[in-house]
Amino acid sequence: MLPPPENPDKHGFLERYAPAFINQRKLQRLLELYAQGERCFQKWNLRGITLENADLSGIDLSKADLSDARLIDVNLTRAKLIEAQLVNAELTAVQLNQANLSWANLRGATLVRTSLAKATLRSTVLPNGEICH
């Protein structure tokens, strides 16, 4: 009887980094579709992606998973992020003006120079774990 094959991912590299790599490719597809006029990307798994210098105003990312994502200089004005997961996300210079973040989870997120002017924050979990009422 042969011994079981050695685990090719014994250090956990694929488990840790493959999902982010795969999701980064999904992000490229999202950007292509957005450029063609598509705005609805509900329930997309974009966990761990990095997005810089993008205008995605009016996008619908409701119920999307953006946990551990890095968004830098991104325009999400009037975006729908209802029930989106932004756990431990890094948002730097992100415009969330008039965005709907109702029931979104931003626990542990870092927001630097990020604007939430006129954003809807109904039952949103804030970075410190508090819930907006």
Image (cartoon, helix red, strand yellow):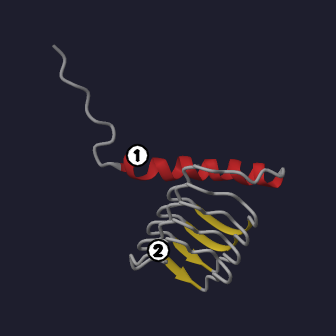
Q: Which residue is mark 1?
A: 14
Give the mark, 2 or 1, whose residue is nearer the N terminus. 1
**Placement of 102 over or under 132, stated as above or below:** above
Q: Which residue is mark 2?
A: 109
- Check the image and name the residue furthest to the bottom: 113
Q: Position of residue 15 (x, y in %)?
A: 38, 47
Q: Residue at x 53, y 50 (%)?
A: 21
- Check the image and name the residue furthest to the right: 36
Q: Residue at x 77, y 54 (%)?
A: 34
- Residue 120 is left or right of residue 14, and the answer is right
Q: Residues within 10 Å of mark 1 (few under 14, many from 20)?
A: few
Tag 2: residue type?
Ala
- Check the image and name the residue furthest to the top: 1
Tag 1: residue type?
Leu
Q: Residue at x 56, y 55 (%)?
A: 64
- Residue 79 is left or right of residue 131, and the answer is right
